[in-house]
Each structure stands twice: as C-alpha cells, then as structure tokens.
C-alpha cells in the first residue's frame, strides 16, 4: 500500500530546513542538517533560521535540543556561549555531546576547560564522565591530568565496564613525563584496577619506572600486594638483566619470608630478572625433594630454569628419572655447556617414549659438543640413525661446526629431500589415507598424537597453543592440505611463522618464532619451550626463511598412528 513520494528538500528555505530537524523520519533530519551545512560554506544562514535554531536549543524535548546542538556544529556556529549553555543542560546526553564537541578542535577556551573540570568532579551522570574520559585524550596535558585525577576518585565507577579503561587510555601517554603524579593517582584512586595498571606500566618503562614500581610496594599487604607483585612480574617477564632497584634489597627479604605463597612465589620470579640469587639454594632443595607438592616443585623449576642456575644442573639431571618432570627439563638442559648433559641424555634415550626421545634429540642437536657425542653414538650403533628426523638433521647444520657437518654428510648425505621425493611421499600417504577403512581407526588416539606432536604450536578445538595457524575447522580443506603442510612445511612460509635462529655466546643455538621483543630481551617460542633470551647473550641472529614446523613430523609415528592423526585433523 506504500507509494513513493518525491521530495526536493533543496528547494526549501533555511527556516523550513530547521523545521525539518523536528521530523520523526531521521532521513529528513539528516538531509536538512547536511543542506544547512553546505549553504553556510558560501553564505550566512537566514536570520529567521538562526532564531529558529535558538528556539530549538531551548525546546523542552532533549532530543530536539540535541538536534539543535548538532546543527550548530554542522554550520560552524557553535560559539563558546552556546557550548557553555549546553554543558549546563539538564539532560545528560546533551551535556555529554557538548563535551565531545567542545574538544574536537583541540583548541578549548580556558573558561570551558574550567567547566570540564567541574563536571569531572560533580556531574552525577556516568555518561558525561565517560565522555570526559574520552575528552582527556584531546586536551592539553595540564587539563588531561586534572580530568584523570578527578575521574579516578569516583568510587561508583570502579566496576563500570568502560570508564576505568577509557580513563587509563588518557593517562598512559602522560605517565612517562610525570611518574610522581601517576603514582599519586595510584595512591588516591578509588579504582583498584587503575592502581594496578599504573604500577604495571611504570615497570615496563625504561629508566626509573621499575624502581618506582618496586618502591611502591612498601607498606602494602594482602590483596593489594599480591596484585602489584603480579603486575610487576607481568611487566618484567619479557625483560632480562634489569638492574635491581635499591628498594628491592630492602623489601625482598620480607617478601621471601611471607606466609602468603602467592607473594613469596611472585617475589622469587621477579628476582630472576633482577639477578637476585638469594632464594636459589632453597629452591634447589625444593625442586630436588619428590615429597614436595607438585605446584611448589614446578615453581622452583620455573625460577631456576629461567635464571639458568648453574648450581642447579645436578638437580636438573636427576629429574630425568622423574616421570613428572623429565619432559620440561629436557629443553632446559641445552642451556648448560657441560659434557655430563650429553652423557646423561644418551644414557636415558632408549628408555624414553617417542615424543620424549624427539625432545631429547633436539637438545643434543643444540650444541656442537652435544651433537658430536650424539653422532659418535649413531656411528657406534648405540643410537639408531632413523631416530633423527629431518628437522634435527637440519638443526645440526645450523651449528656451523666443520666436524659436525662432515659426520652428517657421511651419515645422511644431502640434508633436504628433493621436491620429487616430497611429492611422492604426499601422493603415497594420500592414497593410503583415502583407501583406509577410517571407521577402524580411533579418533581419540589421533587426538593424543596431536597433543604430543602438534599442540605446542597449533590450536585445534580445546587443545593447543596459538603459535602457528589455528587448525580448528581446517578439516574442510581436505587431506591434501594437511599432507602438503606437514611433509613440505617450507613450501610456503608466512612472514609471521618464519623461524629465526639465535646463536648464543655460550654456544647454544636456539631456533624459533620471535613472540615478543623489548630493549633488553627477545622472547622465542621453539617447538618445545618458550625462552627469554637476553640481548647481551646473543652472538648472532639469522632469519632462516624456513618454517618453525619441523620436517619429518610423521616419521615418529608408525603407519597406523599416522592415519589416526590424519583422521583426527580432517574430521574437525
């Protein structure tokens, strides 16, 4: 029953266009406002239209007062006096929009700046305070500090889902220039989260920031202390060898002696970044004692391994006999340039299940002395040649040791399979998979293989780590997609997934993806661990042009296990 209607709003006079701002159809309102704005580019509005706009600004309906405000902004006729009137309007949305419009040009008259400070202190509306929090990013620093300080005193906004975050976005850029003022806010704010963010962000800054964050721990107890220690660790975790602040030596003994395990453990983690080894002897005993709770042993292991504590090496080697701890300790052993490491690993190799054996061989291929011991064992028949996959053989080449290269060439010949070999392998496995009675293969077993081989880098459903491409839903791509990427992972290497090799001054070679970098350290994710490398430790850094995903990934599985894994991948 609807019929089209033809309207030529451009033919209307200025006053008639102002009248359309009251229209119930938003299209008429928008077009009228646009036409008024276009006309004011070449001439002033008619006097009767100006009067009509003033009348609209005084209307009892707040929607119409907002329309008048927007229209005045569009025609560039929103003078200081009119903005002041809008900032005092009884409707919260009119006041809020007046705040936004007032700061859009970033040239706020002083009188209006005073009004904004008053609103931040006393306006009852969270809507207005939200707009003030946003406005603090577009005013001069003096006013911005004042707005942030005042807004952060409103206890009623502590649980608001936007206001604290938006206020923090205004404060963060100011902090580097005045840490003292920021910490005063942290001490006065009624928003616990704001205090957390200030302490955390200060610790991420170079210079005096970490020292101020540590000094601010003085006198804290209970939950505030736990929160600020957690934030301090979050800031320091990706850094290395940060000079210990003077206050740390004064505060640390009480933190280490705390009856609160969370406080004690946070302090012990932070100590590794500051180079404080005070707690290491106690942590070595804690790690070596199998009767200690598992979470406390794991904490001790994390601290000592992060610090690469040389005195802990005997304890680490003993963990090779501990079924619960041997998996995480294997990659850590590569950090120690000691002959007993290679001896212990080779002695345990036959007793490890396939995934642990893969990790142990990775460790043995990280240093030239370890690699030579491994190659001697291969030559003597104590380690089977086929236990080393293509990835590990390739890693031996990264050591750039002439004797290692000679023995590798003598044992394996060329390091990389030819394109023809890879293509034949893909086609063979594809044919085997397509002809297999998949109903006879367990999907659960495939998930177990995924968790062991793939979950350290990929996410599939509830399992895994999001380092490489996510595989959830990738089953729709078919078996060929998986075979090509597993068997020939270097055919196409995305920029985000290119492995970087770091040669360390201690002789260790680490290959992985760079996940974070600070002024003092690089965080690298390898196929078996995440490690923070101090830049002072790095001798060389090379982009390999290759994927972190190892070649020969399927070689550790027997034919049935390969089908189980491929079934699980393609069925998701």
Image: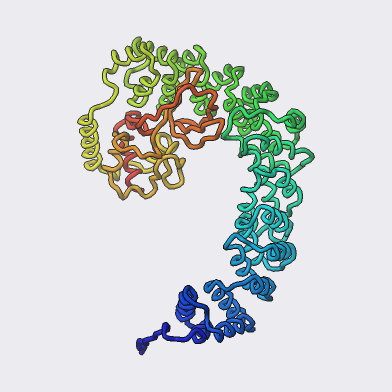
Establish if 18 lies above or below 236: below
Q: Could you tell me if residue 185 is visible in this image?
A: yes
Establish if 252 lies above or below 397: below
Q: Residue at x 71, y 38 (%)?
A: 212
Left or right, 361 with respect to 410, comes to right
161 or 298: nearer the eye? 161
Q: Residue at x 60, y 65 (%)?
A: 100
Residue 30, position in %: x, y? 47, 77
* Residue 307 quadrant: top right
Q: Residue at x 34, y 47 (%)?
A: 474
* Residue 446 quadrant: top left
Q: How is the image coloured?
A: rainbow
Left or right, 162 with respect to 248, comes to left
Left or right, 427 with respect to 397, comes to left
Q: How many marks?
A: 0
Q: Could you tell me if residue 223 is visible in this image?
A: no
Residue 429, position in %: x, y? 24, 36
528 or 6: nearer the eye? 6
Left or right, 183 with respect to 165, comes to right
Work out which residue is located at the far right of the displayed protein and give it.
219
Residue 534, position in %: x, y? 55, 27
């Amino acid at each position: 029953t609807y019929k089209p209607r033809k309207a030529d709003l451009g033919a209307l006079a200025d006053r008639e266009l102002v009248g359309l701002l009251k229209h119930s159809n938003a299209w008429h309102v928008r077009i009228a406002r646009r036409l008024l704005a276009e006309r004011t580019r070449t001439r002033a509005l008619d006097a009767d239209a100006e009067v009509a706009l003033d009348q609209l600004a005084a209307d009892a309906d707040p929607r119409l007062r907002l329309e008048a405000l927007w229209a005045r902004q569009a025609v560039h006729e929103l003078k200081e006096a009119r903005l002041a009137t809008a900032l005092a309007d009884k409707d919260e949305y009119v006041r809020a929009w007046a705040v936004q419009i007032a700061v859009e040009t970033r040239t706020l008259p002083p009188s209006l700046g005073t009004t904004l400070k008053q609103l931040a202190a006393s306006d009852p509306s969270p809507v207005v305070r939200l707009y003030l929090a946003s406005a603090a990013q577009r005013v001069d620093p003096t006013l911005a500090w004042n707005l942030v300080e005042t807004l952060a005193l409103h206890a009623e906004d502590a649980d608001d889902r936007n206001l604290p975050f938006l206020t923090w976005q205004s404060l963060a850029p100011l902090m580097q220039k005045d840490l003292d003022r920021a910490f005063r806010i942290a001490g006065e704010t009624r928003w616990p989260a704001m205090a957390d963010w200030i302490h955390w962000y200060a610790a991420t800054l170079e210079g005096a920031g970490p020292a101020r964050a540590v000094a601010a721990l003085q006198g804290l107890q209970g939950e505030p202390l736990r929160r600020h220690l957690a934030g301090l660790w979050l800031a320091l975790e990706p850094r290395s060898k940060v000079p210990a602040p003077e206050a740390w030596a004064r505060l640390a003994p009480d933190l280490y002696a705390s009856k609160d395990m969370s406080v004690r453990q946070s302090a012990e983690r932070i100590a590794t970044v500051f180079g404080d080894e005070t707690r290491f002897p106690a942590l070595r005993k804690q790690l070596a004692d199998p009767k200690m709770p598992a979470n406390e042993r794991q904490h001790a292991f994390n601290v000592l391994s992060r610090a690469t504590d040389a005195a802990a090496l005997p304890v680490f080697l003993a963990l090779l006999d501990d079924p619960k701890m041997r998996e995480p300790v294997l990659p850590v052993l590569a950090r120690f340039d000691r002959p007993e490491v290679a001896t212990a690993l080779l002695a345990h190799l036959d007793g490890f299940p396939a995934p642990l054996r893969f990790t142990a061989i990775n460790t043995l291929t990280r240093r030239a002395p370890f690699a030579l011991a491994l190659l001697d064992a291969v030559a003597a028949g104590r380690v089977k040649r086929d236990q080393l996959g293509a990835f590990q053989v390739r890693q031996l080449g990264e050591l750039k040791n002439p004797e290692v290269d000679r023995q590798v060439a003598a044992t394996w010949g060329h390091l990389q399979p030819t394109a023809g070999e890879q293509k034949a392998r893909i086609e063979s496995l594809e044919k085997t998979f397509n002809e297999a009675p998949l109903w006879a293969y367990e999907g659960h077993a495939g998930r177990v293989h995924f968790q062991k081989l793939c979950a350290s880098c990929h996410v599939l459903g509830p399992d895994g780590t999001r380092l490489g491409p996510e595989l959830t839903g990738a089953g729709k791509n078919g078996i060929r997609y998986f075979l090509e990427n597993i068997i020939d992972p270097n055919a196409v290497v995305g920029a985000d997934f290119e492995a970087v090799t770091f040669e360390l001054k201690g002789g260790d070679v680490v290959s992985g993806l760079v996940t974070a970098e600070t002024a003092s350290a690089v965080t690298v994710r390898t196929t078996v661990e995440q490690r923070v490398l101090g830049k002072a430790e790095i001798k060389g850094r090379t982009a390999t042009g290759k994927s972190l995903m190892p070649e020969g990934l399927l070689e550790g599985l027997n034919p049935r296990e390969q089908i189980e894994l491929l079934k699980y991948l393609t069925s998701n």
